[in-house]
Image (cartoon, rainbow, N blue to C red):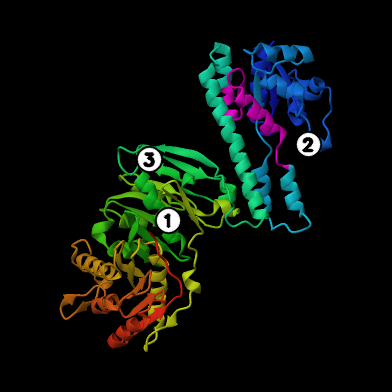
Amino acid sequence: MVRALLSVWDKTGLAEFAQGLHDLGWELVSTGQTHAALTKAGIPVISVADVTGFPEILGGRVKTLHPAIHAGILARRDVPGDLSALAEHGIVAIDLVVTNLYPFVSTISGNGAPPVVEGHLPDAIREAVEQIDIGGPAMTRAAAKNFAHVAVVTDPRDYPGTLDHLRAGTLGVAERVRLAQAAFAHTAQYDAYVAAYFSAMAGQKFPDAVSLPLTRASSLTYGENPHQAAALYRLADPRLTGPGLADLVHLSGDDPSYNNLLDLDCAYAIVADFTGVAVSIVKHNNPCGVGVGSSPAEAYRRAYAGDPLSAFGGVVACNRIVDGDMARAMSGVLYWVLVAPGYTDEALRILDRRQTRVFSLPVPSTAGMLSAFDWQYRPVTGGFLAQSHDTINADEVTFTAASARKLTDAEENDLRMAWRIVKHVRSNASVFVRDGAVRAVGAGQMSRLDSVVAATRIASRSAQDARTSDAALMQVEGGHVSPLVGSVMATDGFFADPDAVEAACEAGATAIAHPGGGRKDADASAMADRYGIALVTTGFRHFRH
């Protein structure tokens, strides 16, 4: 007779699976609550204690750590010495192990991040420690190691397929290898959560070793280019990290591409920085338009006017429920992706007639519970760089006057918006804002001067674009359109030379914010005074490479 050992916390589908095994003639062995559940379901099952001849002790901490269990799992059926040892000690071989582990993640997610442990252990930590499974991973790894002879199932979704294989006699080595890989991944992720929790308890900012629990959320058609393979992986459990791109709800249109997801991530991060209604339009991982307003439609129109040409084929994000007015305002422009926390029925009816891929997602937060899962990781040759998120709140930044003229209230409001956005732009970056709307963005330039010049060129082009019909979004001076007159500018780094200040002033900027700290800060201030504008420093840099 073949024997199966079942010891699971998640009992989804357990009774049906066990009944199927019993019907196929399998002898079932089980532990504690699993045994109770199967007995209640009327399925014949032997207790582990009857197999080991030893009771559960230490409040259930020791149940299956016994040679009668592990020898039965690890015995190689093609090694005569192993079989002789089983016979000598009266141990029955175990051919199938069904496990999943204690609910460590759900336990810690309900209690919050642990304090640094220095003395007495809080009750929350004691509770978490009791949910660190020992016997389960040991059985799981033993069965996975002996995949040549034993099958291991750790995911209830594999129960039906495993039964089908057993009925057909096709549970061969290839399927056992797949199940073993899933089992090792299961225990590895479990250990990653435990290690991250203990890193937090130890107060380690960057521990010597980090294991990241990554789970494939979707396969993508290709990567940045058609010849590159790609997939989207979720980092950790959303109960510990908050919602992420793996939680996107696909409402209409095609599946998202790799590049769509990159731009969507940038666009949604921008609007998440605003407490009021905001819309961003992103192209090639840089914002080409951002607007705020009293409604999503108003914010969208302001965002679109910033660079109508670049907006075509972009990704749009809104931090409020998209209504019919915003959906209609987007008519006539091709957008590949739209993401928002939700949509009215009217908006969905309008959007369903377009090529736009429509998704909903709660506005994200960077406040992860465990620091190991809250870093920004970036691949480099042979490894990863890790850093904390750039979470400086623009509303809390002190604008320190660095010029004779001080900011007006209106300039300060627009300048805080520009400073909020510039951290999302590739360096060197400059962002011009006026009246709650981005007027131009200079992104990814090798010099700060070129960043400002690029922004002024884009602004001039946008002002002349035939699709920009909202005259209130521009100012006219001397019969010529001057789209940046009366705007403010934020830049992500200090001014190495005052030439970029001069270029911004010539374009019409009346106020500028930069981090300060450069050797030529005084020259930048002198240039600002020469043009009579307000110049402030923030004390924070916002490089984005």
Q: Mark 3 vs mark 1: which is more N-terminal? A: 3
| Labels 2, 1: front one | 2
Amino acid of disc 3 = Asp
* Number of numbered markers: 3
User: For the magenta stretch, what is the residue range?
Assistant: 131-160
Under tag 1, what secondary structure?
helix
Which of the pair 289/129 is nearer the observer? 129
Residue named by callout 3: 255
Amino acid of disc 1 = Tyr
Under tag 3, what secondary structure?
loop
Residue named by callout 1: 268
Q: Give me the residue at 52% from left, 57% from top.
A: 366
Give the alpha-carbon distance from disc 3 to disc 1, as whole Å.
Answer: 18 Å
- Residue, far bottom: 404
Amino acid of disc 2 = Arg
Crowdedness of circle 2 by 10 Å Cα count: few (<14), some, many (20+)? some
Q: Quadrant of residue 201?
A: bottom right
Residue 123, percent from left and from top = 77, 52
Residue named by callout 2: 61
Label 1 near label 2: C-beta < 8 Å?
no
**Residue 447 in the image: above or below residue 135:** below
